[in-house]
Amino acid sequence: MQSAIGAARHDILELEAQNASVTTDNQGGVVISIKKFSGGDGVYDGLVSQLSSTLGRDRSESLLPMVEDSLRMALDQAGHSDQTITLTRNPPSATSPQGEFTMRTASAVMTTTTVDANMAYFAQVFGPLAKLVPANF
């Protein structure tokens, strides 16, 4: 099941990257804008079908209704709405000797002082979208 969810997530990230544009804001942050796209429902339906096949009819009828919202959230609503991801870096300071990295989405904000590690995390989690970030960021 985990590999099916991971494959579906990767497919959605590919669709997002195909429908994304990248700009920089006036403070040097990177703004990734993802437009609403089609194709996500097919990925979601394929995942549900694969999970149903793996679980069997009885278990899937019991389990899938309970996890449907989580699956949709994991797949970023499968392209149903525009999204924005904003990445910012702040230079080193007395309180943050390595600088700060912040990633903002509509549902979360993550700030840390381990900049390089978090760019690696962003690349790991967002795969194809990370390739859109300028190399000098």
Image (cartoon, grey):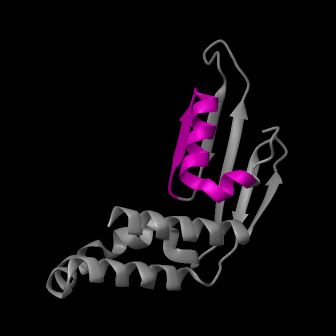
The quadrant of the picture occupied by the N terminus is: bottom left
At 27% across and 77% down in the image, what residue appears? 54
Q: Is 80 drawn above or below residue 112 in the view shown?
A: below
**Number of numbered markers:** 0
Task: Give the dominant element type of the magenta stretch: helix, strand or loop.
Answer: helix
Figure quadrant of residue 82: bottom right
Most extreme residue toward the top is: 94
The stretch drawn in magenta includes residue 114: yes
At 22% across and 77% down in the image, what residue appears? 55
The stretch drawn in magenta includes residue 133: no
Q: Is 94 drawn above or below residue 125 in the view shown?
A: above
In the image: residue 29, left or right of residue 39: right
Q: Position of residue 23 (x, y in %)?
A: 82, 55
Q: Position of residue 129 (x, y in %)?
A: 67, 57
In the image: residue 129, left or right of residue 58: right
In the image: residue 113, left or right of residue 55: right
Figure quadrant of residue 11: bottom right
At 59% across and 65% down in the image, what residue appears? 13
Q: Is 76 drawn above or below residue 123 in the view shown?
A: below
**Span of residues in magenta:** 107-131
Task: Give whichever of 39, 1 is nearer the camera.
Answer: 1
Q: Position of residue 50 (x, y in %)?
A: 36, 80
